[in-house]
């Protein structure tokens, strides 16, 4: 495995899942146009299997405790990028403001244009899952999800929904946009769970 013709050190190569190639770029991939967002009207909602729905304005969301995480990311289109640095609000921090019902087992991220992405609750509650507003020490670029992107470790990157506007908690799994269009529901890069005709 190599980057620009240079062979990788074994320690680095071991971090690249099967079928992936290392890049130092950050390719832009999404479906549909980049939304125009007015932060004065922007809000973030938490709903579903919760005691009471929760709503944050942009100012309120930015006042939540901030964290920084470093993780490797892997796109289904076969590129991987190592040691990416994200800043924002950890999912575990957000959950301090949520009265989650015990029936909740799955999470659906709701984004602009009705886009959705789904993950089991255990992956959402991973200590590195973050609602990121910054990447590499700078605010997210618009085509990478500004003002807010959910970043989920250990899954192919399509599970990390751009332009996220809310989180819904469910008792049963509900396929997201890409899963309904032929992508594998589990999205484990190490198992190359890329595509599937039968997600159930």
Image (cartoon, rainbow, N blue to C red):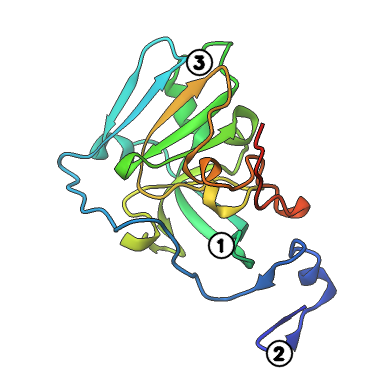
Q: How crowded is mark 2: few (under 14 residues within 10 Å), some or many (20 or more)?
A: few
Residue 88 placement (x, y as % from top left): 43, 47
| Image quarter of the C terminus | top right
Residue 96 placement (x, y as % from top left): 47, 23
* C-alpha gap between disc 1 and disc 2: 22 Å
Say whether disc 1 or disc 2 marks the residue closer to the N-terminus. Answer: 2
* Above or below 110: residue 191: below
Answer with the quarter of the image where residue 66 lies: top left
Q: Is mark 1 on a helix, strand or loop?
A: strand
Q: Which residue lies at the image location 59% right of the left edge and 64% below the top edge? A: 77
Which residue does the numbered mark 3 point to in the structure image? 100
Give the left or right position of residue 152, taking residue 99 as reference.
right
Q: How crowded is mark 3: few (under 14 residues within 10 Å), some or many (20 or more)?
A: some
Say whether disc 1 or disc 3 marks the residue closer to the N-terminus. Answer: 1
* C-alpha gap between disc 1 and disc 3: 30 Å
Give the left or right position of residue 165, taking residue 25 as reference.
left
Q: Which residue lies at the image location 77% right of the left edge and 79% below the top edge? A: 8
């Amino acid at each position: 495995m190599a980057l620009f013709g240079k062979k990788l050190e074994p320690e680095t190569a071991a971090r690249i899942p099967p079928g992936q190639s290392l890049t130092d770029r950050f390719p832009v991939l999404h479906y549909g146009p980049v939304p125009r967002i007015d932060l004065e009207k922007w809000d973030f909602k938490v709903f579903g299997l919760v005691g009471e729905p929760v709503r944050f304005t942009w100012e309120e969301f930015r006042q939540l405790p901030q964290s920084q995480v470093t993780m490797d990311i892997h796109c289904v289109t076969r590129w991987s990028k190592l040691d990416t640095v994200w800043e924002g609000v950890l999912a575990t921090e957000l959950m301090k403001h949520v009265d989650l019902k015990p029936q909740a087992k799955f999470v659906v991220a709701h984004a602009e244009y009705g886009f959705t992405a789904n993950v089991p609750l255990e992956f959402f509650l991973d200590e590195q899952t973050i609602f990121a507003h910054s990447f590499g020490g700078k605010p997210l670029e618009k085509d990478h999800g500004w003002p807010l992107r959910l970043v989920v470790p250990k899954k192919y990157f399509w599970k990390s929904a751009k332009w996220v506007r809310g989180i819904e908690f469910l008792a049963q799994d509900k396929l997201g946009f890409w899963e309904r269009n032929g992508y594998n529901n589990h999205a484990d890069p190490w198992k190359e769970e890329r595509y599937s005709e039968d997600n159930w």
